[in-house]
Amino acid sequence: MEKDSQNRQIKLEKNYVNWLKELKSKIQNVQLKAAVSVNKELLLFYWSLGEEIIIRQENSKWGEGFIKQLSRDLSSFFPDMRGFSEANLHYIRRWFLFYNGEITNSGTSCARISQKIISLLIQIPWGHNRVIITKCKTTKEALFYVKNTIKHNWSRSVLEHQIESGLWQREGAAITNFSETLPRNQSDLAKEVLKDPYIFDFLSLSKEHNERDLELGLIKHITSFLLELGAGFAFIGRQFQLQVGERNFFIDLLFYHAILHCYVVIELKTGEFEPEYAGKLNFYLKAVDEHLKSDGDEATIGILLCKNKDKLVAEYSLSDIHKPIGVSEYQLTQSLPESLKTILPSIEDLETEFTEDLIT
């Protein structure tokens, strides 16, 4: 009864009524522009709405029922628009706060973000933005996924997979000798391509699996494997044969990278990294450069995928190798971070799962 009385008081308050009229006008203008640029116009409106909600909450005494009442009123005025649920209004508020920090009493944010960042946020759908602010802890991490979503045109499910697999923490984390063996521009780009560890949670292998089991599993699930490797990899073959002198040698997995413009040799090891692995891979890279590389190709890159590695041993092993090699670990299953193990989904998150997004 007390909350109903509070909600009625909000509806009758002059400031609220006037502001509601302004919102109605803004929404109608958004609808008129929707045919030209639905996503950008809507997200710009969401951004300003998030800011206004926070400022109104700071400078008025509308109480806890404010957002619920606002949801009812906007949904009543615009029944064909599905973005005004109470849960979505909370997300809109959260979205603005996530990138700006808390709001001061004067109604201005403590750390106003640049228009450049806002221009990035409105290039991806609202559902993607919501996933990012829900699953990322910092704006730096969030913007990493925003930029990559734009760059690679990720679907929402792919975006969720990349965040949950910790791509931000893993990208560029492999031990390499690229700085010493590649030109700077190529070296920087190649470092970004490699991850550590690689997550092969799509495989079902026993603890006693061998290299052939791992190799066949990756080929069987080549789509998932390519997704984990990242953009630009094109699969050429497994056990790829190269003849050197009178002997035949077989590369575990051979790829071509369309962005780096080079061949990529991947060797699989189901145990701990050993120094001799780098020497053998160096030999394979020399052979590929001699037999497959054309004038337009950059130097062939090697990736050693091991079950585990000693960082210092790997660094020592690569220090005097003249071909570009990276060493990474792989994981077959991924455990939840400690911070998430005891946390259940919030009511807001559960409600959102059953609410269609305005834009997909």
Image (cartoon, rainbow, N blue to C red):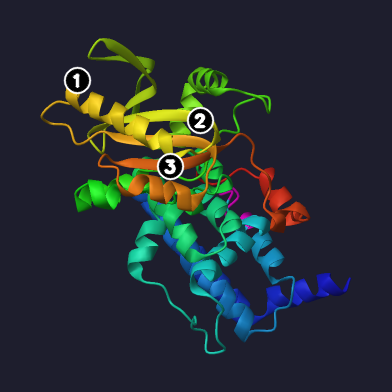
Q: Secondary structure at mark 3?
A: strand
Residue in the image at 49% along x and 48% along y: 167
Amino acid identity at mark 1: His
Q: Of the two numbered discs 1 and 2 on the same chain, state the one appearing first in sequence.
A: 2
Q: Is tag 2's residue or tag 3's residue first in the polypeptide sequence?
A: 2
Residue lying farthest to the right in this orientation = 1
The residue that mark 2 highlights is 269
Secondary structure beneath label 2: strand
Identified at 24% across, 24% down, the residue is 287
Secondary structure mainly formed by the magenta segment: loop
Q: Residue 148 at x, y = what percent?
A: 39, 48
Rendered position, 186 above or below 101: above
- Residue type at the position of mark 3: Val
Q: Is residue 55 visible?
A: yes
Front residue of 267 and 114: 267
Report if the CB atoms under discs 1 and 2 are less than 8 Å apart: no
Where does the magenta region start and end? 75-82
Task: Tell whether 309 sits left or right of 114.
Answer: right
- Compared across the picture, whether 352 is left or right of 125 comes to right
Tell me the kind of residue under disc 2: Lys
Mark 3 — residue? Answer: 327
Q: Dot 1 corresponds to which residue?
A: 291
Residue 330, position as x, y percentages in the image:
54, 37
The kind of secondary structure element at disc 1 is helix
Mark 1 neighbour class, 10 Å CA radius: few under 14, some 14 to 19, many 20 or more = few
Q: Residue furthest left?
A: 295
Picture coordinates of residue 75 (x, y %)?
63, 55
C-alpha span from label 2 to label 3: 11 Å
Q: Quadrant of the N terminus?
A: bottom right
Q: Residues within 10 Å of mark 3 (few under 14, many from 20)?
A: many
Nearer the observer, 130 or 10: 130
